[in-house]
Image: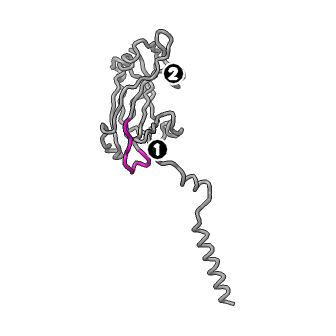
Amino acid sequence: MKNIHKIFLAGLILIGFLSSCEKSTLPIDNLYENVDTSGAFIRTIIAPSSGPHNISGGNFPNTIDATIEVQEGNGSGTQTFTEVRIYLSTFNDQDQIFPTLDNNGNELGEELLATFTASEFTTSEVNGLPSISFSIPTQTVIDNYPTGIFTIPTFIYVRLELQLADGRVFTDTNVGPTVASGNYFDAPFFYNIIFLNF
């Protein structure tokens, strides 16, 4: 009789062991197994001041300065991005609903300011990722939009665009809300700058 109990107990242990080795079918496990980690984002190392900028300097900065770095996936693999593009547009409100108009009532639109190729990036001391600093003189706004009617304040919207070698492009319109809010590594793919045209 003792042998039957021992065989029965050994059988239960074996069944428990085998069933614990089965692949989980829980929805959360399926999500983690199928999550795409091949994306990329731009991490802000030094953010530009969002406070008032003007052209003449003095009490306000007259350049938009930032340091950024690129992270692909979890940052441990080879970086394959090809370039980062910087665009500029202006709005009469901080929510980018009312674009700045020219003297004919037309929207000014968005302008490409700069393109940085991957070869221009250097390894950052902060995270060991490709990094670059840039500076945009606020005079560029006036130079790019000479017919613009600028309200006080105007909001300069600096948008960043990251292109990978496989052709995918990441920017403020195709990232999740956590990234777009700037809460994820301070990486919203844009900067909203208050601009006083004087």
Residue 93: give its label. 2
Residue identifier under label 1? 39
Q: Amino acid at mark 1?
A: Gly
Q: Position of residue 60 (x, y in %)?
A: 37, 22
Left or right of residue 135: residue 185: right
Magenta highlight range: 72-83
Residue occupying the point 54% across, 23% down: 97
Which one is earlier in the sequence, the residue at label 1 or at label 2?
A: 1
Q: Residue furthest right?
A: 1
Left or right of residue 120: residue 174: right
Q: Residue furthest top?
A: 104
Q: Nearer the viewer, residue 108 or 155?
A: 108
> Could you tell me what secondary structure mostly forms the magenta stretch?
loop
Secondary element at image label 2: loop
Q: Position of residue 42 (x, y in %)?
A: 42, 39
In three-dimensional space, the C-alpha distance between marks 1 and 2, rounded to whole angstroms, equals 31 Å
Residue occupying the point 45% across, 37% down: 169
